[in-house]
Image (cartoon, rainbow, N blue to C red):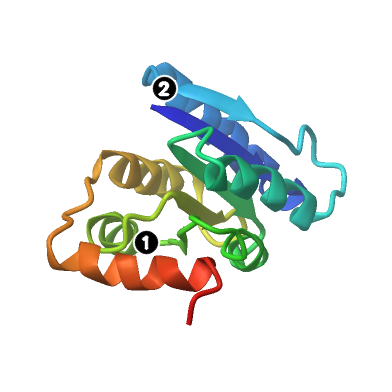
Amino acid sequence: MKVVIGCDHAAYRLKQTIKKHLIDKGLEVQDVGAFSESSVDYPDIGMKVASKISNGFYDRGILLCGTGLGMSMVANRFVNVRAALCNDLFSAVMSRRHNDSNILVLGGRVIGDALGLEIVDAWIETPFEAGRHQRRLDQFDKLGNGDS
């Protein structure tokens, strides 16, 4: 699995922890920044990750900022992106099972490292159930293409 990851300065430490964890698990990971705790604008990073998912260059993406809210708002403006803000295990699992989320968003100031890694693992390992959920995704995907 190919994963693209990015964060703002508020979640830099958690991103580094998650990136190492994913690499240790054998996943291919591209880091698009931030590369320190120096202040950056979260939309710049969010757009990089969302664009790579939208265009199909990566299987999954992970975005982090202080609360996760800003990154969610940026990412979900892109066609073919289903970004889910998940600061608990249940939301992470359900975002995959029922919504086939392709970007996980985490709040670096909301969760700690241990919970963050548990959420990432659950999200990476949970498959999409398809079935009745696929019909709903098909409806959702029309919105991103300007159909109404």
Q: Going 50% across and 38% down the picture, which residue do you hit?
A: 56
| Residue visible at 83% across and 54% down in the picture | 41
Residue in the picture at 65% in, 41% down: 6
Does residue 99 appear to the left or right of 50 in the view shown?
Answer: left
Q: Is residue 43 above or below residue 113?
A: below
Q: Nearer the viewer, residue 103 or 148?
A: 148
Question: What element does badge 2 sit on?
Answer: loop
Specify few, some or many for label 2: CA neighbours under 10 Å numbering under 14, 14-19, or 20 or more: some
Q: Is residue 127 left or right of residue 57?
A: left
Total numbered circles: 2
Which residue has dot 1 on it?
88
Q: Residue 99: x and y, percent? A: 31, 62
Residue extending farthest right: 39
Q: Residues within 10 Å of mark 1 (few under 14, many from 20)?
A: some
Residue at horizontal 43%, vertical 70%? 142
Local SS, label 1 = loop
Residue 148 vs 23, above or below: the answer is below
The image quadrant of residue 122 is top left
Q: Along the line of sight, which residue is nearer the eye, 42 or 143? A: 143
38 lies left or right of 28: right
**Looking at the rendering, which quadrant does residue 21 occupy?**
top left
Q: Which residue is mark 2?
A: 27
The image shows residue 85 at horizontal and vertical percentages of: 48, 63
- Residue 51, given in percent of the width and then of the height, sits at 63, 46
Distance from disc 1 to disc 2, alpha carbons, whole Å, reads: 22 Å
Q: Residue furthest bottom?
A: 148
Left-right relation of 135 to 115:
left
Callouts 1 and 2 close, C-beta under 8 Å: no
In front: label 1 or label 2: 2
Which label's residue is closer to the chain start, 1 or 2? 2
Compared to residue 16, the image places residue 63 above or below, namely below
